[in-house]
Image: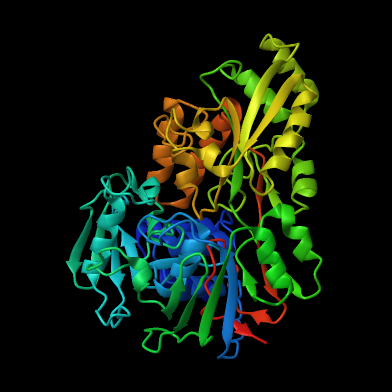
Amino acid sequence: MPRHFMTIDAARKSLTEIENSAVDEFMAGRLDRRDFLRHGSMLGLSLPLLGGILGAAGFGTRKARAEGKPGGTVRAGVATPGGAIDPVTFYDSGSYQLVFQTAEFLCITQPDLTLKPVLAESWSPNADGSVWTFKLRKGVKFHNGEEFKADDVVATFDRLADPNGASDALSVFKGLLSKGGTRKVDDHTVAFHLDAPNGSFPYSVSIDNYNAVILPASYKGDYEKTFEGTGPFRMETYTPKVGATFVRNPDYWGEKALPDRLEFKFYNDVQPRILALQAAEVDILDAVPLDVSQVVLNSPDITVLRVASTAHRQLHMRCDMAPFTDKRVRQALALSIDRSKLVDGLCRGMAATGNDSPFAPAFPATDKSVPQRTQDIAKAKQLMEAAGLADGFDITLTTLRYSDIPGYAQLFQNFAKEIGARISLNIEDQDKYYGKAVFGQSDWLDSPLGITDYAHRSVPNVFLKSPLVSDGPWNAAHFKNPAYDGMVTSYLKALDIGAQRAAASHIQKLLLDETPVIFSYFPDLLVPVRKNVSGLPPIAAGLLLDRVSLG
């Protein structure tokens, strides 16, 4: 037996059947290096073990990034937090960028979407993925001196999963994890007993779910007073509507932060943030929208980090309202779109093409053999005629004034005109568009035709459930399809990548046929920094500043 096969065979002996299935997929060429690392880390395999298998198979591991120099103050310009900062309830970037510096997750996603252990050292599922057991890191303390233990993890997720609370994480945990489902095994072990088997659960307790920072069991609210956590920085000052400062935590359990200090400045709009970066008043911005990116892309003093993302714009058509009760009309509108013009023109090439399902090219389970939908005006007109709409129809598209969405709406309006669909645009402020975000009180959820922004996720679970299953709380398309619901259940409970990909393929094909929602493109995330900044990890979840240095 060749030496490299002997090395891999030795590693296999310590793996479970599910873990070995990932190795099988990789060795058969059905998983590339990135997807193997990502899927293996989700199952709880250590990155060194995965790297060893890759090395034995002839895939060299990447060199470690050079460490920056310590010291100095890193200044970040971010959006003004939307209200009082509370990790249980916040939903806005300005809030969570601050909390990410002081509080930590059980694990975090890396640029290649693998999972890196943080407050958890390891995790593993039971045979069907209904229970996931996490081993917790020892010797960790909160800033207040309390020792981090299993009780803190239990309390954190009971808060987030409480149906009577205001947790923003309920969009993730509803039907997945109930209050009481997180159980202490011992002081440094917890077991998550899920409502239903789930093959990618660790992402739900990672930075991918930004509310899932671990807080002390004693937490009673008033987070702004302390910014309590286990993280590499401690709060120095916080002034609502103005900014915040943080200092290096000398008692941090891991590598000490490189910067001595962080300074956050708040801005109500993106244009003042960009001006502040250009004037060297700040060193880093949170992500900027595509429509203003050209300003910073052309600046000689600024570097723009492009981060591949699964964020997207969902163009929904209400399946319970004419003319969209006929799927041929929905298909015709999808066929009217020139996706290359959206990617190359609207997004300036900084996006991936969508194929009318949430399965972005970045997801390992995406079946890339499913034919890509392209513009076909002749076929679209045939479908319109078959639906009795040869003369077209009039409809209003309602959407929000955010980033590239108004430009997308105008382009879609022009594309649809080619097949006789006469679309009027109603572009609203975000508060009016989302309303109370419940059916009957939201232009987003009630409009017959609309476009909505969805933020990045490292797994498609939320995208598959909330906006598309029959009882989904964000089902703006009012799409009710029992076959689809069953396919999603099959996908979510699958542990091995082969079963996930098979379920994904069925979902992709069904959504191409039904077309309740159009997924045209997945735009990159654009993070501008000054040229002297190094060490910022290019992850779509947010800013992690502990390894940043200023040259």
Rendered location of residue 133, percent (x, y) = 28, 62
| Residue found at x 41% / y 26% | 482
Which residue sits furthest top?
A: 388
Q: Does 8 appear above or below 385?
A: below
Rendered location of residue 456, percent (x, y) = 55, 53
Q: Is residue 101 in view? A: yes
Q: Does 247 appear above or below 199?
A: below
Q: Name the foreground residue: 534 vs 177.
A: 534
Rendered location of residue 270, percent (x, y) = 65, 59
Q: Is residue 246 left or right of residue 404?
A: left
| Residue found at x 56% / y 32% | 511
Q: Does 120 appear above or below 524?
A: below
| Residue found at x 64% / y 39% | 355
Q: Name the foreground residue: 479 vs 190.
A: 479
Q: Is residue 454 left or right of residue 290?
A: left
Give the quarter of the image for residue 12. Answer: bottom left
| Residue found at x 77% / y 76% | 301
Q: Name the foreground residue: 18 vs 95.
A: 95
